[in-house]
Structures are given as structure tokens and as C-alpha cells.
Amino acid sequence: MSTALSLRAFEYWRFQYRRTWRGTIVTSILNPLLYLAAMGIGLGTLVKGQRASSLGTNGSYLEFVAPALVATTAFQTGMFEAMYPVMASIKWIKTYVAMLASPLGTRDVLNGHLMWMVLRILQTSAAFLVIGALFGGFPSWDALWCLPIALLLGMAAALPMTAFSAHTQQESSFAAIQRFIIIPTFLFSGTFFPLSKLPLPLELIAWLTPLSHGVALARSAAQGKLELLPTLGHVGYLALWCVVGFWLAHRIYRRRLRP
């Protein structure tokens, strides 16, 4: 019964998306095109020979950066889907309040919204994966493993962000998160160069972020180099973010939304 009620909450987000899907489809296609053209092809022409081999890949720079961009897309999608939509549902539009006037409970409201975030992460990641393949950034079918990795990473970002968005009272905190967390994490997560090129203190800090583990997993998967122990370590770390994030989100939702 709880699953059925969660699906009812999910249905609201799916129905709302019917009004805005055109804009998101454009960005889902345009962003991969711009990133891959600028970084994978444009910058990639400068990274050849010995420089390319120093990246730890036998392929081109495009093949090095494309899986990482799938991961960063999932990370950013999870973060943004869990920011203003969550706060608006509590503070401005009060979507959650309307849902709770029905037989839905706080867990149903939360789970339904999380289901929608899962779908959005899969949509954007799949679009990036397809366009990256058309550019030649994925030389083998092993790249399909990037999709479940992107989902795990996206939810590792979305769940703690959902908890924070339900807790905070000020939307100005989102601007600080974008400037001081999302952008630095995007730039220093191993997306464009190996983390080993960073000074050791910065490298250790980078490994604390979920995006660095997602990038490492996606790149290894796309190159067919997944190894058991490193893979279990990366997956376990991302799963920990998901578990802790869901626990916090559930507690905060109950406190904020309980009549």
C-alpha cells in the first residue's frame, strides 16, 4: 500500500513535467554537445602522445573525459533536482502540504519525489551517454555500466541535498552551495585530469566527495578496467552517502511536515 501511495506522489511530478519537458530536453542535448565539443574535442587536440598516456588511458582525451562528464551530469542533476523543487514544495507552492491532505504520509511524499529524481538522473545521464557515444567517446559497450553508476552517484548527491533543502529556511544558501561545493567539486574531481596531479592535501579532500568516486567508477567501467576491490570501495562509499542521506531526509521530512 505504501508503494502505491508513493507512486501517486511520483505521478504528480511526472504530470508536472509534461509542461516543462521541452526546455529540459534542449538542455539535456545542448549541454553534452557543448561540453564534449569544447573539452573532449577542442581541448583534446592539445592532449596527445606522452601527455595522453600520462592520463592513465591508452585512448584519446575524449575517451578519458566523456565517462567523467556522464558522472558529473548525474551529480549536478541530483543536486539541482533536490534544491528548489524541495524547498518550493514546503515553503512556497506547498505541494507537500497538499499531498499530506490526502491519504499520503510523509514517507510516501518523500519516496515519490525521490522516484522522480531517479528518473531525471537516468534521463540526463542516458542523453549524455548517447551523445558521447556519437562523438566517439565510448569505444566499447562496457560504457553502458556508466548508467547505473551515474544513478548511484546522482542519488548519493540528491539524498543529502534533499535533507538539507527540507531543513534550511533560506534559499540564499543554495547560491553558496553552487559556488563553493558544486563548481569546485566539478573542477577538482578528476573529471579533466587525474587526481594524482593535485597536491596531496587537495587530493585527499577531493576523495572525500562522492563525485570523485563516481568519476573513477565511470571511467574504469567505460575502459573495461573495473577491479573488484576498488569497485567495492567506490560503490560502498556512494551507498553510504545514499543511506545516511535518506535517513536524514526522512527524519527532517517528518519534523517539517508532520501536522
Image: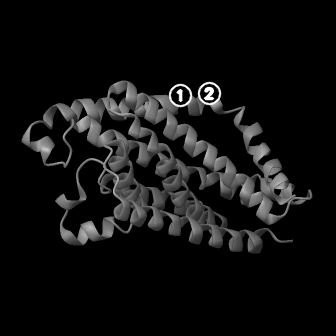
Q: Please rate how many residues cluster around mark 1, counting C-alpha atoms within 10 Å: few if below 14, some from 14 to 19, many from 20.
A: few
Q: Residue furthest top?
A: 134
Disc 1 and disc 2: Cα gap in Å?
6 Å
Looking at the rendered structure, the kind of residue marked 1 is Val
Q: Please rate how many residues cluster around mark 2, counting C-alpha atoms within 10 Å: few if below 14, some from 14 to 19, many from 20.
A: few
Rendered location of residue 68, percent (x, y): 35, 46
Rendered location of residue 188, percent (x, y): 30, 57
Q: Secondary structure at mark 2?
A: helix
Tell me if label 1 and label 2 are in contact, CB under 8 Å.
Answer: yes
The residue where tag 1 is placed is 26
Q: Position of 32 compared to 189: left or right? A: right
Q: Residue 165: name its quadrant.
A: bottom right
Foreground of the two, 152 or 76: 152
Rendered location of residue 118, percent (x, y): 62, 49
Foreground of the two, 164 or 171: 164
Note whether residue 94 is visible: no
Instruction: Relative to 17, say whether 197 is above or below.
Output: below
Q: Residue furthest front?
A: 228
Residue at (73% x, 40% y) in the render: 14
Q: Residue 178: name its quadrant.
A: bottom left
Note whether residue 217 is visible: yes
The residue where tag 2 is placed is 22
Residue at (92% x, 59% y) in the render: 103
In the rendered image, the quadrant that contains the C terminus is: bottom right
Looking at the rendered structure, the kind of residue marked 2 is Arg
Residue at (58% x, 69% y) in the render: 243
